[in-house]
Every structure is written in structure tokens, then in C-alpha cells.
């Protein structure tokens, strides 16, 4: 069977032709007006990017190459005896639009395990970080430092032709994904335990190795959770902060390590990926303030006090979604299957029954429903990964799949430098002064 790189090489020419044709047929057609509010309003809804890997529908949620999360769970290859999809398969799907065979997925697992080692100087950088440096900052430092061995940066210096850019980008993307478990494992062990990181097993899948490096490899349910977790956090169309940052930085022909390092810095913000940490902190505060098994009225009062203090309810709301995030639902289903009686899961469910009504009553949030981050922490906590400062690192491991896939296609399709136009407020006033 073909390797992923061979299959991509087959697919790229027809995709280049397709884009040429779309531009020839429709290049001068308009999507409609740009509103001044969109310039001031974080570009919400502004059509500005192309990415085929996944598309987000406000009501229905994410589809990876047209496939919903339940469809991916049903169609993508699984580990022997497992019931969740292997993220290896999701990566193949993101890149090619095709569901891989079991054999192709196993080949990816082996390839990533073989590439997993990180350079000694990167280990030293991590070992020298104070444990008080946030795990996301450590993560970004280490990923940025991997640029030392970038195949793309080297090939560019040697004068590679534009037509070939995608090939070293692919090699870097594979290295990037493959090395993340060792980086994440080292950060986790340095900050929260004895700093000793075991070796990856060349015969195990990606999630199994990640679990082992974190110290949870013996727990098959946790490994299954990671398979689901990495699959569903991988990509959320092109406009979210981490995906868009990776694309933007990559458009300057910064290599995938530099581009994804920048993505991680965006993911580390509390309105984006750090929300999974914030949710757990918030839930723990509820428990310590009003106790376990709190009444609905006590939880309601706590939610109102959060809003009245001028804070957001973490894990709720979304810039695009207008319904419960299907990634939340997938995690809720996992919890109902594996940990239905967990007290923190019960609190998460209670909060789900209460928060949307309050956000609607408060009248500001356009979407009162939970997003992915409202549910991930409780699952990790259940299996003993209780250190919430680490949660966004796991989101980052997963998001590398989407950003890497996008970088490969951007280089294959010759995506140009991103450079939108900015305006001053005076210019806006002058533009409309007689209208
Ligand atoms: N709690 C309180 N207020 C909220 C919330 C919330 N969960 N969500 C939105 N609002 C407020 C928002 O702060 C804004 O207030 P103001 O007018 O004073 O600036 C108002 O409602 C309108 O915001 P929206 O247009 O509904 O939301 P926007 O698209 O600007 O932002 C988020 C989307 C996700 C940033 C926002 O919903 C939020 O801050 N949620 C909590 C943090 C969170 O869960 N982030 C994770 C998102 C998923 N991810 O992983 O990245
Ligand atoms: C994401 O997964 O990137 C978040 O849900 C945020 C977004 O889509 O804007």
C-alpha cells in the first residue's frame, strides 16, 4: 500500500488544477459586503481563509473532510480491542480526504514512534525550565527549538524550488507530531513528578506511547480516552486562533516548528485552549466554596457571582458555534460509558443544566452552550491526571495534527504571504462622512 507521502504526491496535482479552475471561474466574484463592525469585532464571520481539512457549522459543529465526530468514530481504524478512533487515521483523513486502511494507520504509528526522539539540547532546555514556568510556555519553547533540525529551513537555504516546498514541510510535520509525546511527557514528569521519562515502544500506537510517557500507559481506558481526545481536538476549521496563527506564520515560509510554536502561544490564552485549565479551576472553586453535592440553587448563585465579578464562565460560549459542541457531547458519552458515577462528572452535568439558562438570562453571550473545554478536564482528572496546568499541553499535542496538515497543503498549493489591509478609525470616519 502507498505511504501517506506517496498518496499525497498523487493527490496534489489535481488539487492545484482545481484551485486554478475555481480562481479562473469565480476569482472576481464577491462574498458580499464587509461590515465596519467586523473590523472592530474580531473579524467574526468574515470569509478570509481556505482550508479543506475541516469545516465548522454553527449548529452542527465540526466535520473533518465532511465527516462528523460520530462518523469518524464509526469509520476510522481502531486499536485491537479498542472502540475509539486512532488519531493516526484522523491525520490521514485530514490530509487526503480518505479513510485509511488498518495497515496504513499501523505504518503511521510505526513511523511516528521511530521519529519520536527529541534532540538532547531540547531535553536540556526543558530540564532547565523552572517548574513554575507554565507547561504551555515550556511546550512552545521546545517546539520552537526543534527548528534547529528543520528539513524545510535547510532545503530553503539550499535553494529548493517552490514546487517542492511541500515535501520538506511534510517531513517536518511528521517529525513535529512524532516528537510531541516526548516533549509533553518530559514537561509533565519534570513539573509534576520525578523527571524520568521512559522510552517509546516502537510497536505501540501514538496515544499509547503518549500515555506511557505521561505515566498512564497501563490504564487502557485512559489510552482510549487519549485516542478520542486527540482525534476530536485536532482541527476546528481554519479561523480559530491556533490554526490561523500557524497558517499566518507559515505563510512567511517560517518552518512548521516555528509556525506551530506560534500556534501554541495562541492556544495558551484563556479564551482559547487554556479554557480547559480554567474550567477545572472553576469547578474546584465551586466544590470548595459550596461543597460536593451542592444544590442547584447554590450552583446558580455561584454562576451569577462569576458573571457579576466581570468574569466569563469558562467552557461556555463560542465564536462560531450556536449549539452544544459535538466534542462536548462525545466526551459526555465517553464519561457516561466509563465513569457515570464520578462526582466531578456529576457536577459537570449539573453545570450543563444550569449555565445555558443563566447566560441566556444575562443576555450577552451569543452562544450559551458548552464547548469542548467544559468537559475534557473532568475525564483526565478521573484517571489521575489532576494537574490542570498541563491540560492545554494535551490540546496542543492534538492541534498539531490540524496545523501540520494545513501547512503541508498551503505549501503544496503555493499559498502566498498573508497580508490583509488594516485601516485607521479616522479613515473609517472619512470614508462614510457623507453617507
Ligand atoms: N461567560 C460570560 N460571558 C460570556 C461568555 C461566557 N462563557 N461567552 C461570551 N460572553 C460575553 C463576551 O465576553 C462578550 O461580552 P462583552 O460584550 O462584555 O465583551 C459577549 O458575551 C458577546 O460575546 P460573544 O459574541 O458571544 O462571544 P465571542 O465570539 O466574542 O467570544 C468566546 C467567544 C469563546 C471567547 C467566549 O464565549 C468566551 O469567553 N467563553 C469562555 C472562555 C472559553 O470557554 N473559551 C474556550 C473556547 C473554545 N476553545 O477551546 O478555544
Ligand atoms: C477550537 O477548537 O479551536 C476552538 O473551539 C475555538 C474556535 O474554533 O474558534
Image (cartoon, grey):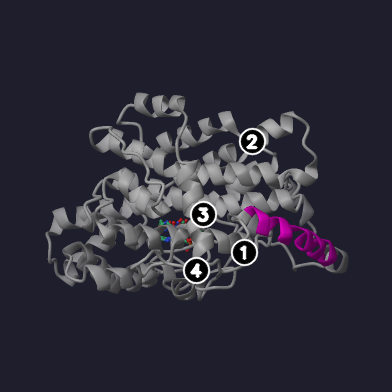
Give whichever of discs 1 and 2 has the lower sequence position: 1
The magenta stretch is: 5-22
- Horizontal and vertical percent for residue 431? 78, 53
Mark 3, other Cα within 10 Å: few <14 / some 14–19 / many ≥20: many
Residue 19 lies within the magenta run? yes
Q: CA distance from mark 3 to mark 1?
A: 36 Å
Disc 4 target residue: 321
The local secondary structure at tag 1 comes to loop
Disc 2 target residue: 151
Q: Are marks 2 and 4 in contact (CB under 8 Å)?
A: no
Q: CA distance from mark 1 to mark 2?
A: 36 Å
Q: Name the disc covering residue 45, or none.
A: 1
The local secondary structure at tag 3 comes to helix
Q: What's the residue at 69%, 39% (across, down)?
A: 253
Q: Is residue 313 left or right of residue 432?
A: left
Give whichever of discs 2 and 3 has the lower sequence position: 3
Q: Is residue 102 left or right of residue 270?
A: right
**On screen, 45 above or below 385?**
below
Q: Quadrant of the N terminus?
A: bottom right
Disc 3 target residue: 108
- Horizontal and vertical percent for residue 69? 46, 71
Q: Nearer the viewer, mark 2 or mark 3?
A: 3
Q: CA distance from mark 2 to mark 4?
A: 37 Å
**Which residue occupies the foreground of this view, 183 or 250?**
183
Q: What's the residue at 47%, 50% (across, down)?
A: 110
Q: Are marks 4 and 3 in contact (CB under 8 Å)?
A: no
Does the residue tagged 1 have its C-beta within 8 Å of any atom of ligand 1? no
Q: Nearer the viewer, mark 2 or mark 4?
A: 2
Q: Are marks 1 and 4 in contact (CB under 8 Å)?
A: no
Q: What's the residue at 56%, 60% (across, down)?
A: 92
Amino acid at each position: 500500500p502507498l505511504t501517506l507521502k506517496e498518496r499525497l504526491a498523487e493527490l496534489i496535482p489535481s488539487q492545484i488544477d482545481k484551485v486554478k479552475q475555481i480562481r479562473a471561474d469565480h476569482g472576481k466574484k464577491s462574498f458580499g459586503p464587509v461590515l465596519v463592525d467586523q473590523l472592530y469585532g474580531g473579524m467574526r464571520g468574515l470569509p478570509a481563509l481556505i482550508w479543506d481539512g475541516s469545516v465548522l457549522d454553527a449548529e452542527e459543529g465540526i466535520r473533518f473532510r465532511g465527516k462528523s465526530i460520530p462518523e469518524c468514530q464509526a469509520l476510522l481504524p481502531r486499536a485491537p480491542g479498542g472502540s475509539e478512533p486512532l488519531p493516526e487515521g484522523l491525520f490521514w483523513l485530514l490530509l487526503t480526504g480518505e479513510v485509511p486502511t488498518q495497515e496504513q494507520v499501523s505504518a503511521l504509528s510505526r513511523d511516528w514512534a521511530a521519529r519520536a526522539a527529541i534532540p538532547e539540547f531540547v531535553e536540556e532546555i526543558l530540564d532547565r525550565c523552572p517548574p513554575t514556568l507554565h507547561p504551555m510556555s515550556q511546550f512552545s519553547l521546545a517546539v520552537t527549538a526543534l527548528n534547529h533540525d528543520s528539513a524545510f529551513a535547510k532545503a530553503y537555504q539550499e535553494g529548493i524550488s517552490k514546487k517542492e516546498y511541500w515535501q520538506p514541510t511534510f517531513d517536518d510535520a511528521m517529525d513535529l507530531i512524532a516528537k510531541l509525546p516526548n516533549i509533553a511527557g518530559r514537561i509533565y514528569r519534570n513539573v509534576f513528578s520525578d523527571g524520568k521519562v521512559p522510552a517509546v515502544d516502537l510497536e505501540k500506537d501514538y496515544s499509547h506511547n503518549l500515555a506511557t510517557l505521561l505515566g498512564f500507559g497501563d490504564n487502557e481506558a485512559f489510552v482510549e480516552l487519549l485516542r478520542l481526545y486527540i482525534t476530536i481536538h485536532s482541527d476546528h476549521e481554519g479561523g480559530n486562533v491556533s490554526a490561523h496563527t500557524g497558517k499566518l506564520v507559515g505563510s512567511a515560509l517560517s518552518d512548521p516548528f516555528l509556525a506551530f510554536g506560534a500556534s501554541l502561544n495562541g492556544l495558551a490564552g484563556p479564551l482559547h485552549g487554556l479554557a480547559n485549565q480554567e474550567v477545572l479551576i472553576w469547578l474546584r472553586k465551586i466544590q470548595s466554596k459550596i461543597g460536593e453535592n451542592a444544590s442547584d440553587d447554590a450552583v446558580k448563585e455561584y454562576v451569577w457571582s462569576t458573571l457579576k465579578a466581570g468574569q466569563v464562565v469558562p467552557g461556555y460560549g463560542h465564536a462560531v458555534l450556536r449549539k452544544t459542541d459535538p466534542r462536548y457531547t462525545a466526551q459526555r458519552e465517553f464519561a457516561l460509558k466509563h465513569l457515570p458515577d464520578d462526582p466531578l462528572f456529576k457536577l459537570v452535568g449539573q453545570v450543563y443544566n444550569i449555565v445555558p439558562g443563566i447566560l441566556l438570562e444575562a443576555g450577552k453571550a451569543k452562544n450559551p452552550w458548552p464547548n469542548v473545554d467544559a468537559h475534557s478536564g473532568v475525564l483526565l482528572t478521573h484517571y489521575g491526571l489532576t494537574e490542570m496546568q498541563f491540560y492545554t499541553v494535551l490540546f496542543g499535542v492534538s492541534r498539531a495534527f490540524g496545523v501540520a496538515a494545513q501547512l503541508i497543503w498551503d505549501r503544496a498549493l503555493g499559498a502566498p504571504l498573508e497580508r490583509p489591509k488594516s485601516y485607521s478609525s479616522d479613515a473609517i470616519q472619512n470614508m462614510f462622512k457623507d453617507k
